């Protein structure tokens, strides 16, 4: 395994991390902004009002995106184990 292989694996891992975590984080961000705007407009400064909607929406988003997240992680893991197996495989010799 050389440096370019390690960089490729690290790049793929970062992309998978963004694919898996990004949607949930963005949804949490937008809900947080919306709740903050509602709190600002209504002048209600209740901590549970900020926490409960985010919790509910993020849990629903996790339920919706879970199949995509699992397939992305499974594909990445399969690809990574195939690369590891290719490193440890004996060199192939071609026929006489």
Image (cartoon, rainbow, N blue to C red):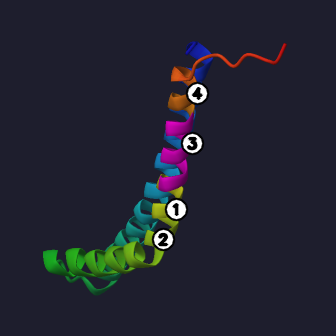
- Disc sitting over residue 71 in the figure: 1
Q: Give whichever of discs 2 and 4 has the lower sequence position.
A: 2
Tell me where residue 94 appears, x and y as whole percent.
Answer: 79, 18
**Please, what secondary structure does the residue beneath circle 3 have?**
helix
Q: Earlier in the sequence, mark 4 or mark 3?
A: 3
Identify the residue under disc 4.
Answer: 86
Q: Are marks 1 and 4 in contact (CB under 8 Å)?
A: no
Name the outermost residue toward the bottom: 42
- Magenta stretch contains residue 30: no
> In the image, is 90 to the left or to the right of 64?
right
Which numbered disc flags the more N-terminal residue, 1 or 4?
1
Identify the mark at residue 79; answer none if there is no mark. 3
Q: Position of residue 24 (x, y in %)?
A: 42, 65
Location of mark 2 (residue): 67
* Mark 1 residue element: helix
**Which residue is at 18% across, 77% downward?**
45
Q: Secondary structure at mark 2?
A: helix
Distance from Cα at disc 2 to Cα at disc 3 = 18 Å
Left or right: 3, with 95 as reference point: left
Tell me which segment is drawn in magenta: 74-82
User: In which image quadrant can residue 42 be found?
Assistant: bottom left
In this orientation, does residue 86 appear?
Answer: yes
Q: Residue at x 38, y 67 (%)?
A: 28
Q: Residue furthest left?
A: 47
Q: Secondary structure at mark 4?
A: helix
Q: Is residue 33 above or below residue 95?
A: below
The spot of residue 44 in percent (x, y) is 20, 83
User: What x and y, as percent, mark residue 13?
Assistant: 50, 39
- Label 2 and label 1: CA atoms lie apart by 6 Å
Q: Are marks 1 and 3 in contact (CB under 8 Å)?
A: no
Instruction: Provide the major secondary structure of the magenta segment.
Output: helix
């Amino acid at each position: 395994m050389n440096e370019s292989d390690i960089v490729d694996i690290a790049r793929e891992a970062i992309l998978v991390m963004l694919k898996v975590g990004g949607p949930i984080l963005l949804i949490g961000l937008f809900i947080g902004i919306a709740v903050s705007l509602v709190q600002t407009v209504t002048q209600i400064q209740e901590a549970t009002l900020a926490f409960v909607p985010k919790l509910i929406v993020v849990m629903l988003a996790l339920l919706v995106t879970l199949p995509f997240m699992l397939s992305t992680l499974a594909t990445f893991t399969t690809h990574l184990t195939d690369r590891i197996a290719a490193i440890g495989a004996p060199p192939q010799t071609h026929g006489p």
